[in-house]
Image (cartoon, rainbow, N blue to C red):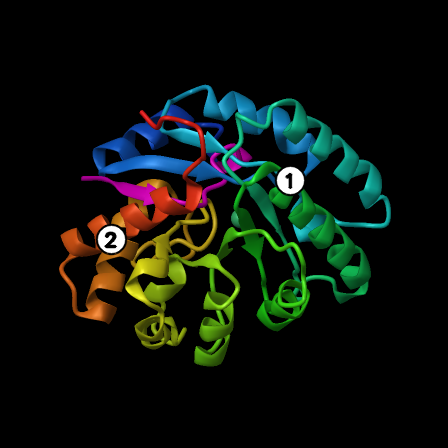
Amino acid sequence: MMLVDTHAHLYASEFDGDRLEMIHRAIQAGVGRIYLPNVDADTIPALLSTCALSDILYPMMGLHPCQVTAGFTETLAEIKGELYRNSRLYYAVGEMGIDLHWDKTTRPYQEEAFRVQCGWACELDLPVVIHSREATEAVLELLEPMDPRPARGVFHCFSGDRHQVERIQALGNYYFGIGGVITYKNSGLAALVKNIPLDRIVLETDAPYLAPTPFRGKRNEPAFLVNIAESLGRALGLPVDEIEKITTGNALALFERSGKVEG
Ligand SMILES: [Zn+2]
């Protein structure tokens, strides 16, 4: 068996000093696949050179909502060019979405970038990896009336309420990314996950951010996915090997590609 980290920024400069060792620690910890989200046009070279380091690393391509500013149409065109030139290389469109924590003034641009990237996912039959910080409602309001809508996706670093869990399920094959926040005492996520069907939960670290307890506040890395799996197991009353089996199956289903034989 293996664990799958569905969201980790391993090309971040935080890993410049020990990137290979960090990947090795992940493998030692039982992490068999790691999916890397892109964030901006200028992160593409680092994303690709990092993915070339190991065959357990899988790239995704998109524009992060915090990088969406007034000149975003040019950036989107660059990212689209890369995605469409090498569409067999990428496992998802992402990360993309809406962030109302950092800058609400760019919301109209963020919404337009969201719609455009959902269009790519539909055309290329790829899942969407959605960032929805303080914006789960905003993302639902965009996705619910969308037609066509991406058939598969994940709400990365999911936060929301029971009612939103149901609305997300009604969208199609949508998953819930659970990371280090579940280990934080007052997050409420350990209680909320009981309302998410087991076959919809995937694990993620969001490394180098959001390290789980007992590493909270430090640099996060995929080897810490084990701590997240254990915490989810405690929340659901399930042994960690069961969590591993279920979440790995879910992650493979989320990123499965039509027409490609997986090795
Ligand atoms: Zn991210």
Task: State the quadrant of the N terminus.
Answer: top left
According to the picture, the residue beneath numbered tag 1 turns out to be 123
Q: Which residue is mark 2?
A: 246
Q: Position of residue 130 (x, y in %)?
A: 56, 54
Q: Main secondary structure of the magenta part?
A: loop
- Asked whether 17 or 140 is in front, the reply is 140
Judge by depth and name the residue closer to the eye, 86 or 6.
Answer: 86
Question: Position of 46 compared to 170: left or right?
Answer: right
On whether residue 4 falls in the magenta region, the answer is yes
Task: Say if residue 14 shows up in the picture.
Answer: yes
Residue 18 visible, this orientation:
no
**Label 2: how many residues lie within 10 Å, few (<14), some (14-19) or many (20+)?**
some
CA separation in Å, label 1 and label 2:
29 Å
Write down the quadrant of residue 188 in the picture: bottom left
Q: Nearer the viewer, mark 1 or mark 2?
A: 1
Name which quarter of the figure residue 238 lies in.
Answer: bottom left
**What residue is drawn where x is 37% and y is 45%?**
253
Q: Amino acid at mark 2?
A: Ile
Magenta run includes residue 16: no
The reply to whether dot 1 and dot 2 touch (C-beta < 8 Å) is no
- What is the span of residues highlighted in magenta in the rendered image? 1-14
Left or right, 122 with reference to 216 = right
Q: Is residue 251 above or below residue 12?
A: below
Kind of residue indicated by mark 1? Glu
Quadrant location, the C terminus: top left
161 vs 80, left or right, is left
Residue pictured at 53% horizontal, 26% vertical: 88
Residue 61 vs 210, above or below: the answer is: above
